[in-house]
Amino acid sequence: EAGVTQFPSHSVIEKGQTVTLRCDPISGHDNLYWYRRVMGKEIKFLLHFVKESKQDESGMPNNRFLAERTGGTYSTLKVQPAELEDSGVYFCASSQERPRGTDTQYFGPGTRLTVL
Amino acid sequence: AQSVAQPEDQVNVAEGNPLTVKCTYSVSGNPYLFWYVQYPNRGLQFLLKYITGDNLVKGSYGFEAEFNKSQTSFHLKKPSALVSDSALYFCAVRDGGFQKLVFGTGTRLLVSP
């Protein structure tokens, strides 16, 4: 079974440009999460999809970030325009539906974003 | 609010010796606790979790963790460390009513030959 995949693995862009990150969850996983680790700090939650619906987007830092999950399969996270503080590693995770909070989230390899 | 503390930035241990990576947590409801490991240039890999039941949880690669409710701790342990265990370890918690994971800052484990 394929794991969570993310593309690209690394992106280097100039401040003010746009970048789109993609995540393909494990097949059959309805839950999809985005997290971010900035400058060696803790990994922080960004948002959670259940199928195509945003269940919780309390961690999205501002309106420069837009996440979508059309059709409940893969998800994209767009940053527009990118700022220096957006640099970090963006992780995607997916999980099966289970009693609330008990599911295991399986993570992708991450996308390292560098904004110059 | 939920929070996790990993008090050690780095843990050094000799191969063959037991290892412990510490984690304490704070939640308002029932804690669901997780350990993940990140090897160089790899994503986060799930090691083990505590949801309910036996306080000693066994996971992948010979790791185990003990849930201690009174001390609000969930320390990761292994009886005999391997050089290949060298990696970055993250503890995470969920408050039972929420889906998102709250992570600690990570602990780098270095196992010397």
Image (cartoon, grey):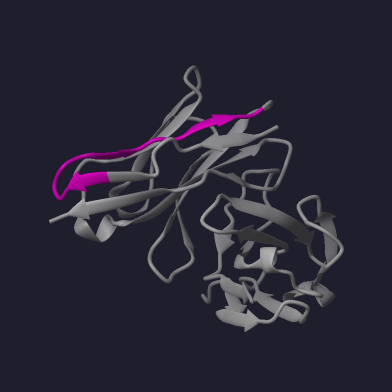
**Residue B48 % position (x, y):** 44, 47
Q: Quadrant of the C terminus of chain A?
A: bottom right
- Identify which residue is drawn at 36% across, 51% down: B108
- Identify which residue is drawn at 12% across, 56% down: B113
The residue lying furthest to the top in this view is: B70
Span of residues in magenta: B12-27
Q: Is residue A81 shown left or right of residue B64?
A: right
The answer to which quarter of the image holds residue A25 is bottom right
**Residue A36 % position (x, y):** 63, 60
**Residue A72 % position (x, y):** 79, 72
Q: Nearer the viewer, residue B65 or B10?
A: B10
Q: Nearer the viewer, residue A16 or B68?
A: A16
- Identify which residue is drawn at 69% across, 60% down: A33
The answer to which quarter of the image holds residue B92 is top right
In the displayed structure, would residue A100 be above or below residue A40?
above
Q: Is residue B54 shown left or right of residue A98?
A: left
Q: Is residue A63 shown left or right of residue B1?
A: right
Number of numbered callouts drawn:
0
**Residue A69 % position (x, y):** 80, 72
Could one spot residue B66 in this view of the protein? Answer: yes
Could one spot residue A95 in this view of the protein? Answer: no
In the displayed structure, would residue A38 be above or below residue B8?
below
Q: Is residue A35 shown left or right of residue A112?
A: right
In the displayed structure, would residue A46 be above or below residue B14?
below
Is B18 included in the stretch rendered in magenta?
A: yes
Is A8 included in the stretch rendered in magenta?
A: no
- Identify which residue is drawn at 64% across, 73% down: A27
